[in-house]
């Protein structure tokens, strides 16, 4: 097999080889069965013919013993039908001379010149019917002459052969039908393997450096669509394995693409503060005049600010990674959700006044939950920061909390610029920004941090937004948070 053979070609070749071996095995089995049946039929025919010949011989021998030779001749000539229907010829041979056998009755005289003594039934093995002229003979001892019964086995052997050919045809047709059925069965059973092999072929041609047209969002959507479609079909067996591997492949491709995009985003975002540090130091050190204390202070301040930006972004990325990897423990305890939201809202009163904005807390209801307060505070803080960032001056931020079914919920909404539907899933990914030009402030890490912390709290988050009409981020705390109404 060629080393360059593709996986799909290999699986299809394996299917053909498997089918070929099956057909060869079936044919060999059928040939063995047919040969066995044929030999058994010849054996049975030989036994039946010998039994018939001996039965008739015993009857005629009694006539010779108790009557006479002429009586037997009279009986044979008077009732030749019995001999004819059994393909038997009766002849007589003189005991005193070695004359030519004389035909008495039975089938035509085409076999009266055979060596009768050579074909005696007691001396013939059953398989000799297939190797030599097909005759069986039996000697009858008369008073003045000997009589021979010669049975021509050829007609019955020919009939047996025709029946065997009919069986061969029937089994050949059965073999063809079974082979067709097995081919369809193999094709149906191995089709998931072929699809998997095709996926692996495509994966082998795909590289991280190759731009992906669909992007992370498309891959994720395709994974979901595939899973829903597969669940609808209710496939099983190899198909389930194929579906799982295809899903893993899609997620891996999306993950690698996301990593590639993340690295590009990090490189882009780090370039600006690092360039500022380099330019500031070059300008300060390359000045023809020694820098004054004020110039040194300003240069160091710019470098420190840029370094803090880099450090902040990297620290946030590491924190998101720690949350995703569950490296830090979560200590659940009873928390008054209403009071927590009020406390966080109070931290933004001065900022809201400066921007002529309003924080509406009328939707807060008494609700006690079991959660980790520090993480939940960070979630609320990041959501409020996000609302302030994308809500114009004079807008309103809405805070809501309370029981929801058997769990609890909190939400942060605004009447800002809103988010287009195609970005709803992507905004929770690291370094993703709706504005790809990156002209706005921020690194696209706030909502990614929110998603990671919400997951750590065994909760879930969703966004409801219409472009130009604001957005509402809702965190749903599940049943296991043990909600206690206040």
Image: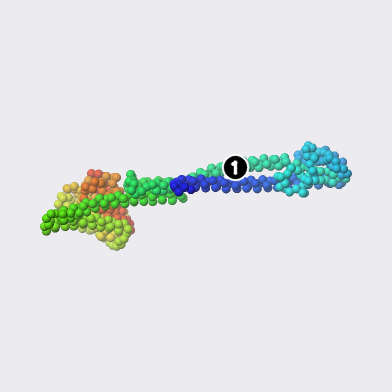
- Residue sitting at x 28%, y 56%: 320
Inspect this view and state whether residue 228 appears: no
Q: Nearer the viewer, residue 438 or 288?
A: 288
Quadrant housing residue 27: top right
Residue at (34%, 49%) from the top-left corner? Answer: 208
**Dot 1: few (<14), some (14–19), or many (≥20) neighbours within 10 Å?**
some
451 lies above or below 119:
below
Direction from residue 244 to residue 410 in the image, left or right? left
Query: Relative to residue 289, is residue 419 depicted above or below?
Result: above
The picture places residue 180, in percent across and down from the top left corner, at 53, 42
Residue beneath label 1, please?
172
User: Relative to residue 95, is residue 332 drawn left or right?
Assistant: left
Q: How is the image coloured?
A: rainbow
Residue at 43% x, 51% y: name it. 241
Report x, y in % for residue 453.
29, 56
**Is there any visible trace of residue 322 in the rendered image?**
yes
Circle count: 1
Please state, as top left, top right, bottom left or bottom right, where the C terminus lies in the image.
Answer: bottom left
Image-based side of 299 in relation to 422, left or right: left
Q: Tell me residue 333's x, y (percent).
A: 28, 62
Which type of secondary structure does the marked residue at label 1 adopt?
A: helix
| Image coords of residue 209 (percent x, y) | 33, 48
Q: Name the residue nearer the viewer: 443 or 389.
A: 443
Residue farthest top in this picture? 108
At horizontal 60% and vertical 42% (from top left) the residue drawn is: 172
């Amino acid at each position: 097999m060629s080393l360059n053979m593709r996986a799909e070609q290999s699986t299809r070749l394996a299917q053909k080889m498997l089918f070929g071996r099956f057909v060869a095995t079936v044919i060999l089995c059928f040939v063995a069965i047919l040969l066995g049946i044929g030999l058994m039929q010849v054996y049975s025919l030989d036994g039946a013919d010998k039994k018939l010949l001996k039965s008739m011989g015993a009857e005629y021998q009694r006539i010779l013993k108790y009557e006479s030779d002429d009586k037997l001749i009279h009986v044979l000539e008077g009732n030749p039908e019995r001999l004819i229907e059994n393909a038997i010829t009766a002849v007589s041979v003189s005991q005193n001379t070695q004359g030519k056998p004389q035909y008495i009755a039975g089938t035509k005289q085409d076999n009266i010149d055979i060596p009768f003594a050579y074909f005696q039934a007691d001396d013939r093995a059953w398989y000799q019917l297939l190797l030599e002229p097909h005759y069986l003979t039996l000697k009858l001892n008369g008073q003045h002459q000997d009589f021979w019964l010669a049975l021509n086995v050829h007609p019955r052997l020919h009939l047996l052969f025709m029946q065997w050919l009919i069986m061969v045809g029937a089994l050949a047709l059965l073999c063809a039908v079974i082979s067709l059925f097995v081919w369809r069965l193999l094709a149906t059973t191995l089709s998931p393997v072929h699809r998997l092999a095709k996926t692996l072929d495509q994966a082998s041609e795909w590289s991280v450096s190759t731009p992906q047209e669909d992007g992370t969002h498309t891959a994720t959507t395709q994974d979901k669509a595939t899973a829903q479609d597969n669940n609808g079909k209710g496939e099983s067996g190899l198909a389930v394995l194929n579906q799982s591997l295809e899903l893993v492949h899609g997620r891996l491709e999306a993950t690698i693409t996301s990593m590639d995009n993340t690295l590009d985003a990090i490189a882009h975002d780090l370039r600006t503060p690092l360039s500022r540090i380099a330019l500031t130091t070059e300008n300060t050190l390359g000045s023809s005049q020694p820098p004054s204390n004020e110039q040194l202070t300003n240069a160091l301040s710019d470098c420190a600010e840029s370094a803090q930006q880099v450090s902040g972004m990297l620290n946030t990325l590491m924190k998101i990674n720690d949350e995703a990897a569950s490296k830090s423990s979560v200590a659940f305890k009873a928390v008054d959700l209403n009071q927590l939201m009020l406390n966080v809202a109070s931290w933004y009163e001065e900022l809201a006044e400066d921007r002529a904005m309003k924080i509406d807390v009328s939707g807060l209801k008494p609700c006690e939950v079991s959660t980790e307060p520090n993480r939940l505070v960070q979630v609320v803080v990041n959501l409020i920061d996000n609302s302030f960032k994308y809500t114009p001056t004079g807008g309103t931020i809405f805070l809501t909390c309370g029981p929801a079914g058997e769990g609890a919920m909190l939400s942060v909404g605004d009447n800002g610029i809103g988010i287009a539907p195609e970005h709803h899933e992507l905004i929770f990914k690291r370094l993703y920004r709706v504005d790809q030009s990156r002209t706005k402030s921020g690194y696209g890490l706030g909502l990614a941090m929110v998603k990671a912390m919400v997951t750590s709290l065994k909760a879930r988050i969703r966004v409801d937004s219409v472009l130009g009409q604001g957005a509402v981020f809702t965190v749903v705390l599940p049943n296991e948070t043990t909600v206690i109404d206040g």
